[in-house]
Image (cartoon, rainbow, N blue to C red):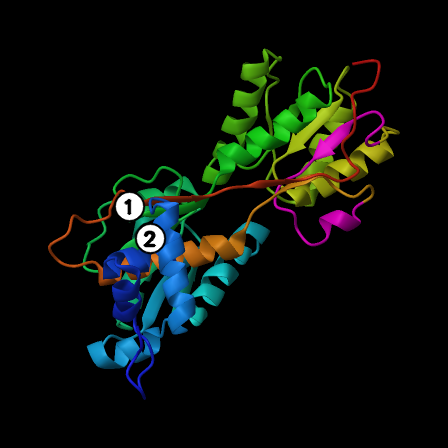
Amino acid sequence: MSVPVGRSPVMADVARLAGVSHQTVSRVLNGHPNVRSETQERVQAAIEELGYRRNSSARALVTRRTGVIGVVAFDTTHYGPAQTLAGIEHAARADGYFLSVVTLQTVTREAVSEAMDYLAQQSVEGYIVIAPKRAVVEGLAGQPAERPVVAVEGGEAPDLPVVCVDQVGGGYLATRHLLELGHRTVHHIAGPGDWLEAEGRIAGWRRALEEAGAPVPEPLYGDWRPRSGHRLGAQLAEEPGATAVFVANDQMALGALRALGEAGVRVPDDVSVIGFDDIPESEFFTPPLTTVAQDFSEVGRRGIGLLIDLLEEPADTVPMTQARSVVPARLVARVSTAAAPDRA
């Protein structure tokens, strides 16, 4: 199959060559997991043969759409939300979209509604809401459905399309890693109780311990920052028999490492420590930190892709309000974890 001279290939050309529907091509491009592998291979082969490149800007000119996506973000001083926003921005730019961003200082239903109203005045086509806190998800409930909305890191948000990292799976990976090193149990320094990511990591930690028949200590709650990790690390240094700790993010792990060192506790000889996020600095901690990596670029790509699917969804199809795309977490093993000491 060839494309007429002077015209770039479009999605319909890819669909015809691959023998699939336009919507199937869109789903392959946007990484949806419910497309069969052989179909994905046919679509990718057609894309390569035609040299297809999605051009959302050109589409916007033809359809009179604005090409602007509204983003509601919260607390981008933290690594996770900041990197999630960066991943969304990169993915939007790659697809020819522009972003208009509102960052909330406080999270209430009224604040979320006001942010979305403000973005609507800028004629955004749809919304991506970075929703790491339960209050953000609750603030989205009952919002007018005039434009599609995708919740990023929205946990189990009801009646909303969601893209998120597998926080439960990440917490499980971290805890299983320590149990497989022979530790009798794993203590947990958790994130704030109103954060969905913290809830997911606790759930994964607890599941791994219960499956192993290991004791489940009470989690200690921090605020994501190194100072709280230092305070709680000092507390764990006094805990008899504590040989392993899963810290819910790398910044709190940094504080915990310092507190353990100040108490004369050697890592990993006496206590193994694992974090979460794989921030760029974590491999330069003392010792280099074992952690769980989140693929923020993939989260951004899937979030933008799902929103584009919603924008392109034919009016006579069933709304994708239950759509959910989960990005796997990945264990990064370094020097801060080791076999349990003999005293375990």
Is residue 41 placed above or below 341 in the rendered structure? below
Is residue 157 placed above or below 51 in the rendered structure? above
- How far, Cα to Cα, is label 1 from label 2? 7 Å
**Dot 1 amino acid type:** Leu
Q: Nearer the viewer, residue 176 or 152?
A: 176
- Which residue is at 59% across, 31% downward? 173
Q: In the current view of this chain or complex, which residue is farthest to the front? A: 1
Quarter of the rendering containing residue 68 = bottom left
Q: Earlier in the sequence, mark 1 or mark 2?
A: 2
Tell me whether the residue at label 1 lies in contact with that at label 2, contact meaning CB atoms closer than 8 angstroms. Answer: yes
Pointer 1 local density, CA inside 10 Å: few below 14, some 14–19, many at least 20: many
| SS state under label 1 | loop
Whole-percent x, y for residue 217 in the image: 62, 17
Residue underneath mark 2 = 150
Q: Is residue 272 magenta?
A: yes
23 on left or right of 275: left
Q: In the current view of this chain or complex, which residue is farthest to the left? A: 316
Residue underneath mark 1 = 160
Q: Nearer the viewer, residue 281 or 302?
A: 302
